[in-house]
Image: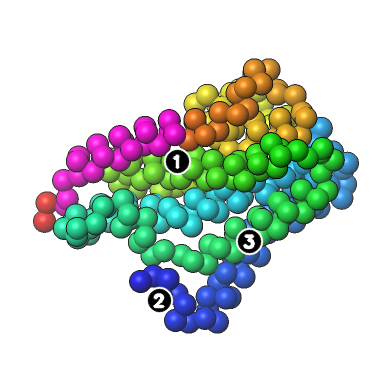
Amino acid sequence: MWVRSTLAYRASFVMMAVGNFAASGLDFVAIMLMFSQIDALGGFGLPEVAFLYGTSSASLGLADLLLGSMDRIGGRIRDGTLDVMLLRPVPVFAQVAADRFALRRLGRITQALLVLGWSLTALDVSWTAGRVLMVPLMVVCGAAIFAAVFTAGASFQFWAQDAAEVQNSFTYGGNAMLQYPPTVFAKDLVRGVTFVIPLAFVNWLPALRLLGHPDPLGLPGWVDFLGPVVAVVMWAGVGVAWRYGLRAYRSTGS
């Protein structure tokens, strides 16, 4: 329904998608301006940082397209309109995810994939079948990890009722952090996004292996390949949190 509504006004949709493309592209423009003054950042050249940018932004873009509307659940909890979703013979999770589905978010994904494509041609990497396969796997696993964070934030809103900005600090804020090399951040922060909220598995750890950079935390090499496992574990956890939060919902009482 939301896709049909969006495409009913084609010119408006194109302008919104182009605007989304341009707005997200400003982040990479800032990176290019930075590299006009320096040759490397934390031991990473421009193509390597572009690779981090492309993989992280594409992952967030996919998660945002599918589950970006989850932050609206806080408003529905406050005004009691979540009751309507509970009456429909469709899973509440699917309804919340589809609420005001924004196809314009394809602009962010397109921009990220263009940067990623350029970086792959500019990287000094000896490509093998395994390394080629790692790239789409990173994007898909990264999207699953970001989507789990979106869902965790939505689950928390059953109690907080207005925690959208807290959720955004870990999704959009985490994406902004992952666009830069882990070597420019304090080790305590890197440990936090590896062991507490494992955003490092979106692109940092697999990218270090692919690009041939040492791990600043000195972790075993096999840890770099745990992205799919981390995504599955996170979804198992947020699935429990979502069901528990939904059972705890008590409407507005009016």
Amino acid bearing label 3: Thr
In the depicted structure, whether residue 57 falls above or below residue 39: below
Q: Going 39% across and 70% down the picture, which residue do you hit?
A: 2
Q: Which SS class for mark 2? A: helix
Label 2 Cα crowd, 10 Å radius (few <14 / some 14-19 / many 20+): few
Q: Is residue 109 left or right of residue 239?
A: right
Whichever of labels 2 and 1 marks the residue nearer the N terminus, that label is: 2
Whichever of labels 1 and 3 marks the residue nearer the N terminus, that label is: 3
The label nearer to you, 1 versus 3, is 3
Considering the whole magenta stretch, tell me its main secondary structure: helix
Looking at the rendering, the stretch of residues picked out in magenta corresponds to 232-252
Which sits in the foreground, 221 or 130?
130
User: How far apart are the alpha carbons under marks 2 and 3?
Assistant: 22 Å
State the image quarter where residue 68 is shown.
bottom left
Estimate the x, y position of residue 146 in percent, counting from the top left. Answer: 50, 43
Q: Going 49% across and 26% down the picture, which residue do you hit?
A: 196
The residue where tag 3 is placed is: 110
Label 3 Cα crowd, 10 Å radius (few <14 / some 14-19 / many 20+): some
Amino acid bearing label 2: Ser
State the image quarter where residue 183 is shown.
top right
Q: Going 81% across and 50% down the picture, which residue do you hit?
A: 121
Estimate the x, y position of residue 178 in percent, counting from the top left. Answer: 63, 40
Q: Going 76% across and 48% down the picture, which residue do you hit?
A: 120
Amino acid bearing label 1: Val
The residue where tag 2 is placed is: 5
The residue where tag 1 is placed is: 149
Whichever of labels 2 and 3 marks the residue nearer the N terminus, that label is: 2
**Quadrant occupied by the N terminus:** bottom left
